[in-house]
């Protein structure tokens, strides 16, 4: 501190006041004379405790407004997922989709119900902030709470290299959905209790988490090659169930991602190059939460 004092220039109090007054006057003049176009953008209006959130384009709808009969099990709005926490951006357990994708699901659901089944959705639109959450989690080698259930045979350090995690997801474009089939009348899925003993997603159905869906050979979000839709090790009833889902969805315009039996994208996508970040919440919809019949 003594060195700082010695470094100061010997300026009188009167001179110092003059310098400060001149600097203040210059700043006021600059602020008053600056053209409006050069000003920094105004901050978004803040709501209670947070900034204004982005909204969904008008083309997005709540699936329940299109078909209330489709079952919902939105895992990322809960702790029952490969991270073990509720995922960023999932404020409500909703399935938001572009309207063409939602209407195609309605057509598929009509056909499946006629055959004694119902669709059940696990995930639909996914905000970019949720994808970012996955990326942060994947970069943390110490967090393997859910490994035994969701990636029992994959080293976490390989999740990026093997394609299980990426910095962008087709779900963020709004026309991709993760789903399965449930035999009607639908039974109840067992409640997930954080901290309960975990069973590998590759185990036989009677040992896995008690999902009420038909047996697809693995659980949902199983990071394993056994989840590849046409994996040759999947035979019998499990293969028939995968093909039943695949063929029913392909008839209405969905395309399967070959490495995940549950993952389908409606084509053509209304937003093939856009990755949205509005939260999963009915308030994100642009005053048009109900699709016209």
Image (spheres, rainbow, N blue to C red):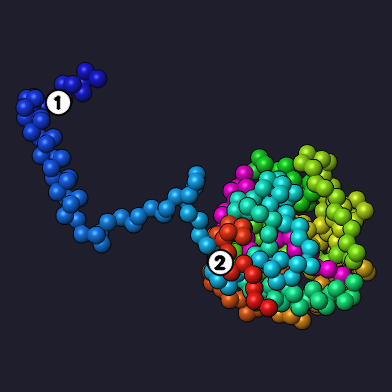
x and y percent of residue 176 in the render? 66, 68
Left/right of residue 187 with respect to residue 12 in the rendered view: right
Closest to the observer, 116 or 173: 116
Q: Quick check: 31 above or below 125?
A: above
**Cα distance in 3D space between marks 1 and 2:** 62 Å
Q: Which residue is mark 2?
A: 287
Q: Quick check: 178 above or below 87?
A: below
How dense is the environment of label 2, judged by Cα within 10 Å: few (below 14), some, or many (20 and up)?
Answer: few
x and y percent of residue 63 in the render? 69, 67
Marker disc for residue 8: 1
Q: In this orientation, does residue 233 appear?
A: no
Q: Quick check: 271 above or below 132?
A: below
Q: Is residue 137 magenta?
A: yes
Q: Residue at x 76, y 78 (%)?
A: 107
Left/right of residue 127 with respect to residue 215 in the rendered view: left
Disc 1 element: loop
Q: In this orientation, does residue 105 appear?
A: yes
Reading the chain from its start, which is encountered first: label 1 or label 2? 1
x and y percent of residue 124 in the render? 67, 64
Say whether marks 1 and 2 touch (CB < 8 Å): no
x and y percent of residue 277 in the render? 54, 60
Please state the extent of the stretch shown in magenta in the rendering: 117-140
């Amino acid at each position: 501190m003594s060195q700082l004092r010695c470094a100061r220039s010997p300026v009188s109090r009167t001179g110092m006041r003059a310098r400060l007054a001149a600097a203040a006057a210059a700043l006021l003049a600059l602020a008053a004379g600056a053209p409006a176009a050069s000003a920094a953008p105004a901050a978004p209006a803040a709501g209670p405790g947070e900034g204004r959130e982005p909204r969904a384009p008008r083309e997005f709808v709540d699936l329940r407004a299109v078909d209330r009969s489709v079952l919902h099990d939105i895992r990322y709005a809960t702790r029952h997922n490969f991270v073990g926490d509720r995922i960023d951006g999932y404020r409500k357990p909703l399935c938001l989709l572009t309207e063409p994708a939602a209407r195609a699901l309605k057509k598929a659901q009509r056909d499946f119900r006629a055959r004694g089944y119902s669709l059940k959705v696990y995930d639909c639109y996914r905000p970019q902030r949720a994808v970012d959450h996955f990326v942060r989690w994947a970069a943390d080698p110490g967090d393997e709470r859910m490994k035994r259930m969701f990636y029992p045979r994959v080293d976490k350090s390989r999740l990026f290299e093997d394609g299980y995690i990426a910095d962008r997801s087709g779900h963020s474009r709004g026309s991709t959905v993760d789903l399965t089939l449930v035999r009607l009348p639908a039974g109840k899925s067992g409640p997930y209790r954080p901290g309960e003993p975990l069973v590998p997603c590759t185990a036989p159905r009677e040992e896995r988490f008690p999902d009420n869906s038909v047996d697809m050979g693995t659980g949902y979000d199983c990071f394993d090659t056994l989840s590849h839709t046409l994996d040759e090790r999947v035979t019998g009833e499990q293969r028939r169930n995968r093909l039943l889902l695949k063929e029913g969805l392909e008839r209405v315009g969905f395309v399967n991602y070959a490495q995940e039996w549950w993952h389908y994208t409606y084509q053509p996508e209304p937003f093939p190059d856009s990755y949205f970040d509005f939260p999963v919440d009915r308030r994100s919809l642009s005053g048009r939460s109900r699709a016209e019949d």
